[in-house]
């Protein structure tokens, strides 16, 4: 089982990484103004970790309602995914992958790790 690692950035904002049991970072959050709002973001990832996957690299992809994962190609031509909450906000963003299949595996890893992942706060 993975974990949510919460930290406080130099600007005083809270953020988190979803970390797999092997220590690899699966995804990273945005910065939150408070620890409480960061915990809401973590809850959203746990709640929405099995959402539909919208592959935006395909021609005419389905347009699923939020919450959903979106796979897309960045300016660096790597593949990324975002998990968007019910309100459309990005709650988890991946690193870049050279293969689209790896982005799909990253999404699967969110579903495998997030539901029961404990929260570790690093202050």
Image: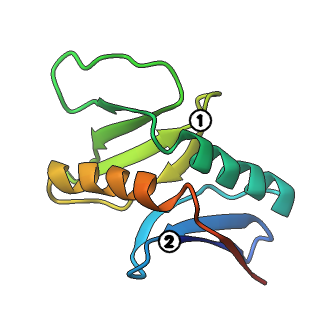
Q: How is the image coloured?
A: rainbow
- Disc 1 designates what residue? 85
Question: Is 80 rendered above or below residue 95?
Answer: above
The residue at 21%/57% (across/down) is: 102
Q: Secondary structure at mark 2?
A: loop
Which image quarter: residue 96?
Answer: bottom left
Residue 49: x and y in percent read: 49, 45
Residue 11: x and y in percent read: 76, 71
Q: Can the viewer see residue 34 in this picture?
A: no
Asked whether 65 or 14 is in front, the reply is 65
- Alpha-carbon neighbours of circle 1 within 10 Å: few (<14), some, or many (≥20)? many
Asked whether 24 or 28 is in front, the reply is 24
Residue 80: x and y in percent read: 32, 50
Q: Looking at the image, is mark 1 or mark 2 nearer the viewer?
A: 2
Q: Are marks 1 and 2 in contact (CB under 8 Å)?
A: no
Asked whether 38 or 46 is in front, the reply is 46
The residue at 17%/49% (across/down) is: 100
Q: Earlier in the sequence, mark 1 or mark 2?
A: 2
Q: Secondary structure at mark 1?
A: loop
Measure the alpha-carbon separation of dots 1 and 2.
20 Å
Identify the image quadrant of the C terminus: bottom right
- Disc 2 designates what residue? 2
- Alpha-carbon neighbours of circle 2 within 10 Å: few (<14), some, or many (≥20)? many
The residue at 59%/50% (across/down) is: 46
Question: Is 80 rendered above or below residue 54?
Answer: below
Question: Is 104 rendered above or below residue 96?
Answer: above
The residue at 43%/77% (across/down) is: 21
């Amino acid at each position: 089982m993975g974990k949510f690692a919460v930290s406080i950035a130099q600007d005083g904002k809270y953020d988190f990484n979803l970390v797999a049991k092997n220590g690899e970072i699966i995804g990273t959050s945005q910065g939150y103004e408070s620890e409480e709002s960061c915990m809401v973001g973590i809850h959203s990832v746990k709640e929405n970790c099995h959402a539909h996957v919208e592959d935006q690299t395909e021609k005419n992809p389905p347009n699923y309602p939020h919450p959903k994962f979106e796979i897309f190609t960045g300016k660096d031509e790597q593949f990324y995914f975002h998990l968007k909450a019910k309100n459309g906000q990005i709650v988890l963003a991946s690193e870049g992958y050279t293969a689209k299949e790896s982005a799909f595996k990253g999404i699967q890893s969110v579903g495998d790790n997030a539901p029961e992942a404990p929260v570790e706060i690093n202050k």
